[in-house]
């Protein structure tokens, strides 16, 4: 009885083995094509997210620079700017430890250190937009603004800032709409 059961089991396994031989070439081709289409849809989205993540570095650092300038102004009744254009002395004086990165170069300028200061993140990369932050002294307050350039690439190619300096409209700091948009305060 046992040998008869074993023989039937072996026959059944051999019969099923022929039916379940695997995937056909057509089935594999369809799967590869579907994966290719899905990846081509996802890749641009992934790349734009990468640029957004790198741009958040500038927003975070300029926000920290704006807050440090507010604190410095509260203590000294004046803002701090780079002694020589782009030497980083203002960032050192603020004590916030922000350094130039592979993506952005940070600069601080002031028209008059008692009224306003402009913190810049100039793009070093053609696919990133430049950013500019402003801190103003008006009516005993120090309002801030953070602006992002409307276009990328120009800064990295020309080496100049594309986002114009923000200005006060009454007592409210605003971005220059022609060259930038407000992304923070």
Image (cartoon, grey):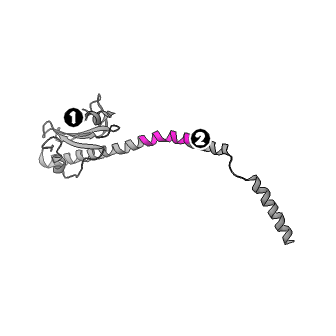
Residue 118's place in the image compared with 72, above or below, is: above
> Of label 2 and label 1, which has the lower sequence position?
2
Who's the residue at 82% across and 68% down the image? 6
Determine which residue is flagged by label 2. 33
Task: Give the position of the C terminus as an image quadrant.
Answer: top left
* Left/right of residue 183 with respect to residue 140 in the rendered view: right
Residue 79's place in the image compared with 14, above or below, is: above
How far is disc 2 from disc 1 in space, using C-alphas?
Answer: 59 Å
Who's the residue at 84% across and 67% down the image? 5
Q: Is residue 25 visible?
A: yes
Residue 45's place in the image compared with 10, above or below, is: above
Is the residue marked by circle 1 packed among few (<14), some (14-19), or many (20+) residues within 10 Å? some
Give the label on residue 171, or none: 1
Count up the numbered dots. 2
Is disc 2 in contact with disc 1, using a CB cutoff of under 8 Å? no
Q: Which residues are magenta?
A: 36-47
Answer whether residue 39 is magenta in the image. Answer: yes
Q: Is residue 146 visible?
A: no
Who's the residue at 68% across and 49% down the image? 23
Choose top left, top right, bottom left or bottom right for residue 184. top left
Q: Position of residue 164 (x, y in %)?
A: 24, 32
Q: Position of residue 66 (x, y in %)?
A: 23, 44
Viewer-closest of 60 and 53: 53
* Left/right of residue 60 with respect to residue 82 in the rendered view: right
């Amino acid at each position: 009885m046992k040998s008869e059961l074993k023989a039937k089991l072996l026959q059944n396994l051999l019969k099923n083995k022929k039916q379940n031989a695997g995937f056909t070439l057509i089935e594999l081709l369809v799967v590869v094509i579907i994966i290719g289409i899905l990846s081509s849809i996802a890749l641009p989205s992934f790349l734009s997210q990468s640029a957004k993540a790198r741009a958040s570095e500038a927003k975070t650092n300029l926000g920290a620079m704006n807050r440090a300038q507010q604190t410095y102004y509260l203590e000294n009744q004046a803002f701090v700017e780079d002694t020589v254009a782009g030497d980083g002395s203002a960032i050192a004086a603020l004590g916030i430890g922000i350094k130039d990165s592979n993506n952005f170069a940070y600069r601080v300028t002031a028209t008059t250190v008692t009224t306003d200061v402009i913190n810049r993140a100039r793009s070093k990369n053609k696919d990133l937009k430049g950013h500019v932050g402003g801190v103003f002294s008006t009516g005993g307050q120090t309002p801030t603004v953070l602006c992002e350039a409307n276009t990328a690439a120009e800064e990295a190619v020309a080496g100049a800032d594309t986002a114009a300096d923000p200005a006060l409209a009454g007592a409210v700091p605003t971005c220059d709409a022609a060259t930038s948009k407000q992304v923070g305060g």
